């Protein structure tokens, strides 16, 4: 080969080696978009599992499909584009690894934020200060609690107690 041929081969190898391995072809969702769609699909799947436990009358597969369609509408993606993108990412393990790692990091970050977030508690009232009672004049008597009328048995027991107290109190 000539010198020019070798130079062309070296330039082609350099061009291939320097290409961005994280770039995706057109028609495939970008990694960030795919990550957001997958995250919402995982959330929808968890929700449908919760619904299945809550009510035995729900068809889980139909509910999953309905929720997935809502996710696709939310992200302006068709089912076909998502399926094509999913197959592309699964065929490229290095892209799949970064995608799944970022999903895991997102889940861990959201979980730690939810645990570190302060709980909404009502504002506590300031502590009560105890004010000493004012001295009352000796002539004033405290109000008496209204009492129910006593039965004959209670009156007899009270008089018996009074007599016993007098007997022990007098020398």
Image (cartoon, helix red, strand yellow):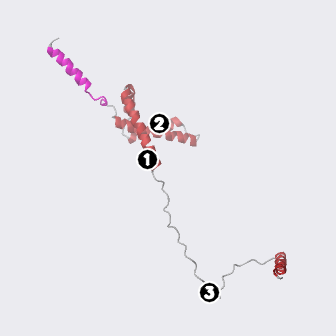
Secondary element type, mark 1 = helix
Which residue appears farthest toward the top when viewing the image? 1
In this rendered view, identify the residue nearer to me: 164 or 21: 164
Percent x, y of residue 37:
40, 38
Q: Is residue 21 magenta?
A: yes
The residue labelled by disc 2 is 65
Q: Is residue 169 visible?
A: yes
Between disc 2 and disc 1, the foreground one is: 1
Considering the whole magenta stretch, tell me its main secondary structure: helix
Q: Which residue is mark 3?
A: 137
Compared across the picture, whether 63 is left or right of 80 comes to right
Relative vertical location of residue 73 with respect to residue 19 in this rendering, above or below: below
Q: Secondary structure at mark 3?
A: loop
Quarter of the image that includes the C terminus: bottom right
Q: How many marks?
A: 3
Residue 156, position as x, y percentages in the image: 85, 78
The residue shown at (26%, 24%) is 17
Look at the numbered discs 2 and 3 and tell me whether their residues touch, using CB distance below 8 Å: no
Mark 2 or 3: in front is 3
Tell me, yes or no, if residue 80 can be seen here: no
The numbered disc on residue 113 is 1
Q: Start and end of the magenta stretch? A: 3-26
**Residue drawn at the location 37% of the way across and 29% of the way down:** 89
């Amino acid at each position: 080969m000539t010198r020019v041929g070798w130079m062309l081969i070296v330039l082609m190898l350099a061009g291939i080696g320097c290409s961005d391995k994280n770039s995706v072809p057109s028609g495939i969702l970008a990694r960030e978009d795919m990550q957001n769609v997958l995250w919402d699909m995982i959330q929808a799947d968890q929700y449908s599992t919760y619904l299945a436990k809550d009510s035995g009358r729900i068809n889980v597969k139909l509910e999953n499909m309905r929720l997935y369609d809502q996710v696709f509408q939310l992200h302006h993606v068709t089912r076909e584009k998502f399926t094509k993108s999913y197959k592309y990412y699964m065929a490229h393990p290095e892209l799949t690894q970064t995608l799944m790692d970022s999903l895991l990091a997102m889940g861990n970050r959201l979980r730690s934020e939810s645990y570190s977030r302060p709980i909404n508690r009502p504002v506590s009232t300031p502590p009560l200060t105890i004010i000493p009672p004012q001295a009352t004049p000796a002539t004033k008597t405290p109000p008496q609690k209204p009492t129910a009328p006593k039965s004959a048995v209670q009156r007899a027991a009270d008089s018996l107690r009074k007599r016993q107290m007098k007997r022990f109190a007098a020398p």
